[in-house]
Amino acid sequence: MAGIAACGEVVAGALEAARAACVIGNRTSEIASAVQDALVAADAEPLFVGRPTDAADAGQPFPAVACVSVDDEVIHGIPGERRLQGGEVVSIDCGARLDGWCADAAITVPVGAVTADCLELLEATRTVLDTAVDLIRPGRRWSEIARILQELALDAGYGVLDDFTGHGIGRDLHEFPAVPTHLTRGLAGRGDFTLRRGMVLAIEPILVLVGSVSGAAVRGDGTACGVPVETASDGWTVRTVDAAVAAHFEHTVAVGRSGATILTASTARVEDPRLAPAVL
């Protein structure tokens, strides 16, 4: 566990460097460069760059050390020449390996002054992640936790995503089991699992400000319907079809004797006035 914790500390530091780069006028590539510099300084291996796509048509491997997704880019955004504008939100996802152990985390950062709706979206997504961590106990079925997280998200009026879930993590970035933060058909079947001491999970809720096409609905079996998304021509960037803004937070978490420990916690304080976002 100490090895993953050490890697988690590096990932958390890389994300704080990325947060500092989320300023008006910076390119998304500069955010990725901040992550790369932090990983190089720690002698950690970035796990996203060169990663093959899961798509059936097998597009290009992922070309950067971090996913940088802006506004309606839900996940897997490729950093490049796009310049940040005030009012946008930026999701940064980073995974690394240090001394053979992996960690994975994500944050969503407001750029300049953002709307109250966006700030509430970010807070709601953090709350889902915090609640998941608080509910972890050995012997508990993950479906029980996922049901509570789903109610939190949908009752607040946010959408969730199909096909993108958290995961086990350890020697490899993606390990068994899949860890959804809402009820899925997999959790309703053989995909459910019991939490056990020593498990390490990457938990990553993604919530969406639902729009005219998106919706927060529940099927007859209690599972949530994900909002519609599409993959861009780059083969990686996933967007909401109606330009609805999304937020993504993730921690690598270890299951202990009586609860959970966050292994990717940042030392930066959200209450620090220098980190407090402005509201439009």
Image (cartoon, helix red, strand yellow):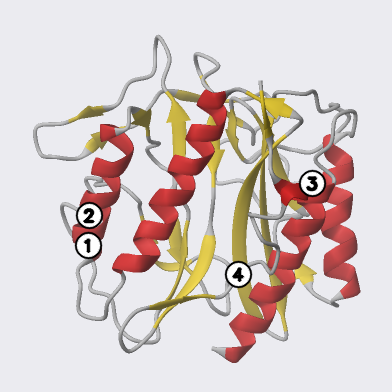
Instruction: Return the disc, 2 or 4, that comes first in the chain's sequence.
Output: 2
Judged from the image, the secondary structure of the residue bearing numbered disc 2 is: loop
Q: Which amino acid, mark 4? A: Thr
Find residue 187 and name its label: 2
Residue found at the far top of this picture: 212
Q: Which mark is in front, 1 or 4?
A: 4
Element type where label 1 sits in the image: loop
Q: CA distance from mark 3 to mark 1?
A: 33 Å
**Mark 3 touching mark 1, by CB under 8 A?**
no
Which numbered disc, 3 or 1, marks the residue that appears first in the sequence?
Answer: 3
Crowding at dot 3, Cα within 10 Å, few <14 / some 14-19 / many 20+, comes out as some
The residue at which mark 4 appears reads as 264
Residue hosting label 3: 63
Amino acid marked by disc 2: Leu
Q: Amino acid at mark 1?
A: Asp
In which image quadrant can residue 139 be found? bottom left
As measured in the structure, the alpha-carbon distance from the residue carrying label 1 to the one carrying label 4 is 25 Å
